Amino acid sequence: MANLSEKSAALQRLELLFDDADFTRIDAFAKSSDGSVEVAAGFGTVNGAAVYAFSQDIASDGGAVSKAQCATIQKIYGLAQKTGCPVVGIYDSNGMKVSQGIEALAAYGDVLKASTSVSGVVPQISLILGPCLGTSSLVAQAADVVVAVKDAECYLGAPSETTAQDNFANGTFDVLCDTEAQAIDTVRQIVSLLPSNNLAPLPVFDFSESGAAPSAGMPVLDTITAAADAGSVIELKAGFAENKVVTALATVMGSTVGFVGYGAEALCPCACEKAAAFVRLCDAYSIPVVSLVDTQGFKKGETAEQKGIVKKATALACTYAGATTPKITLVTGQAVGAAYIALAGRGSNADLAFAWNGAVLSALDPDAAVAFLYNDRLAAGEDRSKLVEEYKSTEASAMHAAESGCLDDVFDPADTRVKLCAALDVLSGKREATIARKHSVK
């Protein structure tokens, strides 16, 4: 195929991505040495914001990754770096052009370097609509957010029986969609929520309130939905560490916010990894992070230790502490022990820390604390359950923590949105200088 057909899937996908199906081609007549054209690329707007994109064409030599394709993709990244615009990569290729051997492999290494160079500088979104194999999977996964359809393939080594659902469950895919149209629309929404680059202001949208009010005992995703603007929540990595932590982009008062909601369970290594990755994403683009904390602490036991809970928990704590974006913590249930330090306290370097009435903040699990602090009363025959409730309502209460200077305010769940709006507004101008260094080791 000497030229991309005007009806090729690659071009149709770009038309669906860009506003009014209008975009300008880049390298419109470039082709491989055998005449095949395995990628379409160009620039246009997505909901009014300038965006660069490339789309592999599996109908042209299987979308084989060639030197020519790599040169076009590198050009996209180079222009994005110069102009500070996001990049959307649409992947649908059976792999490398084997006939070009090591030259094609080296060219794809240059693409990976180009992607890495702009990581955290301009948003990168990968959209996997077919095969994404070998080296392609590395480049796709280097993006900030990965969206895929349910029949997508993504793996490093062939043959593989890994399914799209497997990749959604292990956190490789952030969003899994049923159809291409749904996936492309999701990418448009995500691109709109992110700033054009790490120095650009956050986008601002018209908004309306959700109409719902958070309440005690509400599932954490419902709490986020109630606190955020109506219809604005996009959950990421919903299949990974499911029910333990929720990570979502949304808007509050029309401005982008990242929500991390901890779901009342002990945090396993995967949950720590998921939360840390999301906080890093938000911090890279100065998106405020609102953490809703209700957790029994970090997972205990031999299995959790063997899976690296200490390492993952440390990485999560260090990520929070090192993030300079506005950070707000709201304890909605329990914040106990090391999890309090990592997520909810001044140790996490939160700018403002709040709690709902009835929240529990404790150095130890309440049962353990009672055994340690009230041993004499237990020995005298007092009821353990009543002592636990007494401990929760006194020394472990949110009001006691506030009186100790560990919280800025304590309020009813129904007041959550009002309090968050005020906090986000006052922190919108936050500037924090850091010590000069290349990067944190943890």
Image (cartoon, helix red, strand yellow):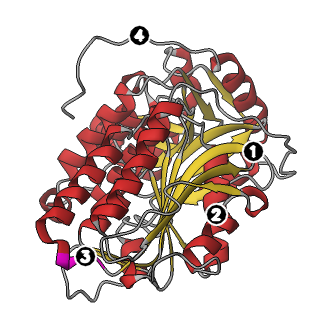
Q: Secondary structure at mark 1?
A: loop
Measure how far apart labels 1 and 4 are at the Cα level. 32 Å
Tell me which label, 1 or 4, sits earlier in the chain. Answer: 1
Q: Nearer the viewer, mark 1 or mark 2?
A: 1
Q: Secondary structure at mark 3?
A: loop
Report the number of discs.
4
- Mark 1, residue position: 48
Measure how far apart labels 4 and 2 are at the Cα level. 35 Å
Label 1 close to label 4 by CB (< 8 Å): no
Name the amino acid, label 3.
Answer: Lys
Tell me which label, 1 or 2, sits earlier in the chain. Answer: 1
Name the amino acid, label 2.
Answer: Thr
- Mark 4, residue position: 433
Q: Secondary structure at mark 4?
A: loop
Residue 61 in sight here: yes
| Residue nearest the observer in this picture, 313 or 258 | 258
Label ID, residue 186: 2
Residue located at (71% from left, 53% from top): 225
Label ID, residue 97: 3
Q: Position of residue 239 (x, y in %)?
A: 46, 70
Residue located at (57% from left, 42% from top): 258
Tell me which label, 2 or 3, sits earlier in the chain. Answer: 3
Name the amino acid, label 4.
Answer: Ala
Q: Residues within 10 Å of mark 1 (few under 14, many from 20)?
A: few
Label ID, residue 237: none
The range drawn in magenta is: 95-99
